């Protein structure tokens, strides 16, 4: 069954009947300033819809993946977090930082799953853990879209709602660092120096939103702008209560990065400031961790095992030798990858933003074989079974309903009801056959949002 077909078809019928164009459903003047600053006017003119059963199952599947992932170090490595980090492709420097900042602490429940929905339901491609995941602003689109009476009446009729994604994000930050829900902290959004300039204007708008609506005094800075004195960490002359980490583990583990972040890590260890999600939590974001989950699903209890096998596509670490297939049969990994090129994706285990991803169906056989051999020799790569996403129809500027491929960024946020923090969409026209929906690098990719039924339909 397709993802949300009944609600989608009902809504599409209404906008067809009215002949509404994208600009009528979402005029540029209604795009929230934060979204306009980050993404300009590249927004979908309708939400994705989940019916109650679909939403309940998806939230349960995500909780199952998180539970299983955080159990992997104990199940496979006797609780040795360093061994787990090495097994999922981290360098010695990254592994040392994981052990230093994550060992002995609960794993954050804040993250974003990247999901495609095929004709059998949602499938998890990646699971990104920690405060560095983006697209939280997408939730602001719901209110903008609901200003149109057609969607407003449709949502009321079908009992549709959505989380306040920004609010749940900040509530989850307070919860995980141990601040009261009604606290009004000063929060430093800390980047590395090279990453701040391109983000300064959108971040100022975010900070204004945080202050006006959520009681959080957010200060965007890079790590070199922090001061350490009087037993506190300071940003732009203000004592900081919480560091909202916006730099990656990989960045912090380089020689230059380590020199920059070391004073901050030391201040956290001395208790001079709180940090929302330590760098080490990102060990669970490795695609090789997802490969271990796919490979060892049989280690878990029957209910959890069934969810994993349904929700996580076949994914394996690239290494020479035999590999177990979906059928349970064994095959040589290289031979299988060459033969099944059109149904596989080759991915670096520990990069972000789609960097290095090689879709087999878009790659000539000689190039595929060469990259595969390099991955087998180097390590740090995974193979994943291709997911064929079901297209979703979206109103085009002239009102034509156009099929788009949609990537669902489904947020886990511990302060939110059932841990569901909302869904951000990245979408591109099916005709372009875009394998990696990079919203920051591809101007054809649009941002979208989602709504779900709050109770079973009567």
Image (cartoon, rainbow, N blue to C red):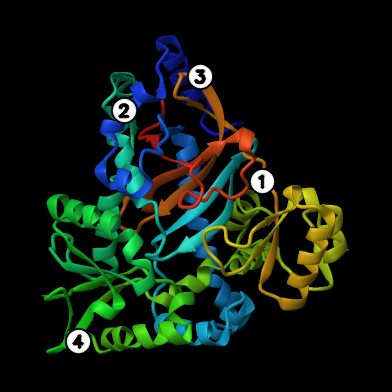
Residue 403 in which image quadrant: top right
Quadrant housing the C terminus: top left
Q: Quadrant of the N terminus?
A: top right
Q: Are marks 1 and 4 in contact (CB under 8 Å)?
A: no
> Which residue is the site of mark 3?
400
Which circle marks residue 275 in the picture?
A: none
Q: Earlier in the sequence, mark 1 or mark 4?
A: 4
Classify 457 as above or below 126. above
- Residue depicted at x 28% and y 83%: 268
Q: Nearer the viewer, residue 284 or 159?
A: 284
Q: Position of residue 96 (x, y in %)?
A: 49, 87
**Which residue bears the numbered disc 2?**
27
Q: Is residue 440 left or right of residue 428?
A: left
Q: Is residue 40 visible?
A: yes
Q: Nearer the viewer, mark 2 or mark 4?
A: 2
Earlier sequence position, callout 4 versus callout 3: 4
Mark 1 and mark 2: Cα distance apart in space: 33 Å
Q: Residue at x 13, y 57 (%)?
A: 215
Cα distance in 3D space between marks 2 and 4:
46 Å
Mark 3 or mark 1, earlier in chain:
1
Decide which of tag 2 and tag 4 comes sooner along the chain.
2
Numbered badge on residue 387? 1
- At mark 1, the secondary structure is loop
Which residue carries the number 4 mark?
Answer: 228
User: In the rendered image, which quarter is residue 181 located in?
Assistant: bottom left
């Amino acid at each position: 069954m397709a993802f949300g077909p009944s609600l989608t078809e009902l809504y599409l019928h209404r906008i067809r009947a009215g002949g509404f164009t994208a600009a009528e459903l979402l005029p540029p003047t209604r795009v929230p300033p934060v979204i306009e600053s980050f993404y300009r006017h590249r927004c979908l003119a309708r939400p994705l819809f989940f019916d109650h059963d679909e939403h309940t199952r998806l939230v349960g599947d995500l909780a199952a993946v998180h539970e299983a992932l955080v159990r992997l170090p104990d199940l496979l490595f006797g609780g040795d977090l360093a061994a787990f980090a090495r097994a999922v492709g981290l360098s010695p420097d990254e592994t040392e930082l994981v052990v230093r900042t994550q060992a002995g602490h609960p794993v954050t429940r804040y993250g974003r799953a990247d999901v495609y929905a095929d004709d059998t339901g949602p499938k998890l491609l990646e699971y990104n853990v920690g405060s560095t995941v983006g697209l939280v602003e997408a939730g602001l689109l719901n209110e903008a879209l609901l200003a149109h009476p057609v969607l407003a009446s449709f949502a009321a009729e079908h009992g549709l709602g959505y989380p306040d994604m920004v609010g749940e994000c900040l509530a989850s930050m307070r919860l995980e660092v141990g601040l009261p829900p009604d606290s009004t902290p000063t929060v430093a959004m800390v980047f590395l120096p090279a990453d701040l300039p391109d983000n300064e204007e959108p971040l100022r708008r975010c900070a204004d939103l945080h202050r006006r609506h959520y009681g959080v005094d957010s200060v965007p800075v890079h790590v070199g702008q922090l001061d350490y004195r009087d037993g506190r960490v300071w940003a732009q002359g203000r004592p900081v209560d919480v560091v909202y980490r916006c730099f990656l583990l990989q960045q912090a583990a380089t020689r230059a990065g380590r020199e920059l972040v070391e004073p901050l890590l030391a201040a956290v260890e001395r208790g001079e400031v709180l940090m929302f999600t330590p760098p080490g939590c990102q060990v669970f974001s490795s695609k090789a961790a997802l490969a271990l989950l796919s490979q060892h699903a049989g280690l878990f209890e029957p209910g959890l095992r069934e969810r994993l096998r349904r929700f996580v596509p076949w994914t394996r670490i690239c290494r020479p030798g035999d590999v177990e297939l979906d059928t349970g049969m064994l095959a040589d990994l290289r031979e299988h990858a060459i033969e099944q090129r059109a149904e596989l994706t080759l991915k670096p285990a520990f990069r972000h933003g789609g960097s290095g991803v090689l879709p087999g169906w878009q790659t000539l056989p000689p190039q595929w074989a060469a990259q595969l051999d390099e991955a087998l020799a180097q390590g740090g790569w995974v193979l994943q079974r291709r997911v064929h996403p079901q297209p979703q129809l979206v109103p085009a500027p002239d009102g034509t309903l156009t099929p788009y491929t949609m990537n669902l960024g489904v947020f886990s946020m511990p302060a939110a009801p059932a841990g569901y923090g909302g869904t951000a969409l990245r979408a591109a026209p099916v005709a372009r056959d875009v394998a990696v929906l990079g919203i920051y690098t591809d101007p054809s990719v649009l941002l979208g949002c989602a709504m779900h039924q709050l109770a079973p339909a009567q």
